Image (cartoon, rainbow, N blue to C red):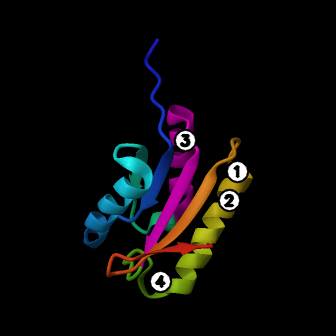
Amino acid sequence: MAEKHVTDAIVVHCIDFRFQKYLNDWLNEKVGEGNYDRLSIAGSVFDFEAVFEQVQLSGRLHEIKKVIFINHEDCGAYGEAGSRERHEVDLRAAREKIGERCVRDLEVELYYLHLDGTFEKVS
């Protein structure tokens, strides 16, 4: 039987190259280097259905306990609709859908990443 691989979290963030250094440093400090699955997709939670499939897969394969969603300022996938308020609404909706649709209880953390690399927790 294959060895089981377990990790604490899946992190979902945008593909935007401008934020990768901030993300790498922050995640290694906050979650632990190599202690998470990582999904990089344009717009982060913008296409929730695509994201949800991967969260489910991470849960099944790696028994995650937490989902971390990170949207960012000036996101091209959102275009003109990408106001801070819109990002917060979408992040909260993603958390709610995870709670409704996942068979296991997952902790969900939400963050809004500013262009200067500052992470702001969304409640």
Residue at disc 4, secondary structure: loop
Q: CA distance from mark 4 to mark 3?
A: 29 Å
Residue pointed to by mark 1:
101
Span highlighted in magenta in the image: 47-72
Q: Pick whichever of labels 4 and 3 is earlier in the sequence.
A: 3
Instruction: List the residue tagged with mark 2.
Output: 97
Amino acid on which disc 4 is placed: Gly
Tag 4: Cα neighbours inside 10 Å, few (<14), some, or many (≥20)?
some
Q: Which residue is mark 4?
A: 82
Query: Three-letter amino acid code at disc 2?
Result: Lys
Q: Nearer the viewer, residue 24 or 89?
A: 24
Of the two numbered discs 4 and 2 on the same chain, state the one appearing first in sequence: 4
Number of residues whose C-alpha sits closer than 10 Å to that of mark 2, classed few (under 14), some (14–19) or many (20 or more): some
- Name which of mark 1 and mark 4 comes first in the sequence: 4
Question: Which quarter of the picture shows residue 85?
Answer: bottom right
The residue located at (43%, 52%) in the rendering is 31
